[in-house]
Image: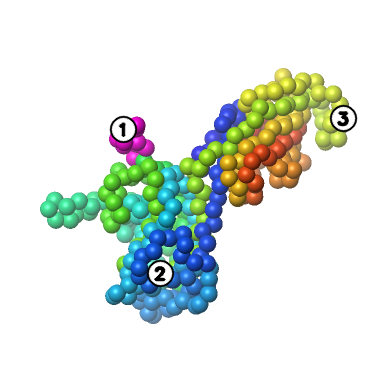
Amino acid sequence: MKKLRWTLVLLLPFAIHAQSTISFSDLSFWKNTGKSNWQIASDAQADLNKPEVLSAQSGTGILVNLPNKENRSNLVSNKEYGDFDATFEFMMATHSNSGFYLQGRYELQLMDSWGVKTPNTGDCGGIYKRRKFNPKEYLYEGHAPRVNACLAPGLWQKMEVSFQAPRFDAQGKKIANAKVISVKLNGVIIHENVELTGPTGGPISETEVAKGPFMIQGDHGAVAFRNLTVTDLGSSEAVMAPINYQVYYGNFKSIQEFITKKPDASGFTEKLTWDVSAKPFHYAEIFKTSLTIPKAGKHQIEFEIAGKHWISINGKEIFKEENEENNRRKTQVIDLPEGKVDLQITLIKTKKSVDNKLGFW
């Protein structure tokens, strides 16, 4: 997500992005492989005593790779992504091996690494090595996970990835490397701010691009997936209209103490900022504006705001804080329709010890 953080002043444009949960009721999100190793199931199980074996139950809800000699294809998404955040759960069979490729080019290793004391680039969560042929193949670079956070085979594990695509100039020349902003495995940070100088081994192409698909390695071992959620950070930005503000001065304890009074200051501003108040404390503010949402769906909203506050979007109160405190970070995923929705923020600041802070992502 293009996270625009504001303290003291919130600058435009405002950016929120649609979050999509990928359905595993069928394989329509993925390109047809012509093979049968990728299947939809309702559940999967692994036996610690049976290497590379998963058993799947009929139904829907999870994606399972059950490769054999004749059927061992990789799976490539139809949709392509630039910058994105992705979260998914996966289950490894005993001694199994797979990989989740960002843009089809940069592999996050999926491996049964349970019990490994010192993980390397080939262990679970590792960013796999690059390769060259000179004339024989050799591997180089790669990034091992900070720690081994891998669980035992047969258990569902969670991967959280934030990725920034490579940047190109108008002539198509790369001017900035791709970057893994962060990776969490089972809640543990295993990578932060890792630059990727080029594709890792086994990509769909050695040529880097601004947008590319997901690819899941299917030619190695048995693996299952569920709850794949993607926030496309390259999607269109929401647009914020000019903001109407009203400022009231006083040592207020509640909204009722000022809501019927004439504001001491009012007007319109092109930027959302607490300092439309002439005083650093003993004030209340009301901001009213509208957001134009480019696409209906689930959107992640995050505020960092100090003081008492009430925030509503599209007529629904999403955040409420009646205690005057510092640095209140709040996040919520909400359904928003396409088109204009109203945004209203009411803020009370009476304590000198509480910061003037307003952050919006």
- At x 70%, y 38%, the residue is 342
Q: Amino acid at mark 1?
A: Gln
Is the residue marked by circle 2 packed among few (<14), some (14-19), or many (20+) residues within 10 Å? many
Q: CA distance from mark 1 to mark 3?
A: 59 Å
Q: Is residue 166 left or right of residue 234?
A: left
- The disc labelled 2 sits on which kind of residue? Trp
Helix or strand or loop: what does disc 1 sit on?
loop
Is residue 174 highlighted in magenta?
A: yes
Magenta part of the chain: 167-177
Q: For the residues marked 1 and 2, what is the alpha-carbon distance in whole angstroms? A: 39 Å
For disc 1, the marked residue is 171
Q: Is residue 356 left or right of residue 68?
A: right
Marks 1 & 3, CB-CB < 8 Å contact: no
Vertical relation: 306 (above or below) 131:
above
- In the rendering, at what x and y percent does residue 19 appear? 55, 50
Disc number for residue 260: 3
**SS category of the residue bearing label 3:** loop
Structural crowding at the residue carrying mark 3, measured as other residues with C-alpha within 10 Å and reported as few (<14), some (14–19) or many (≥20): few
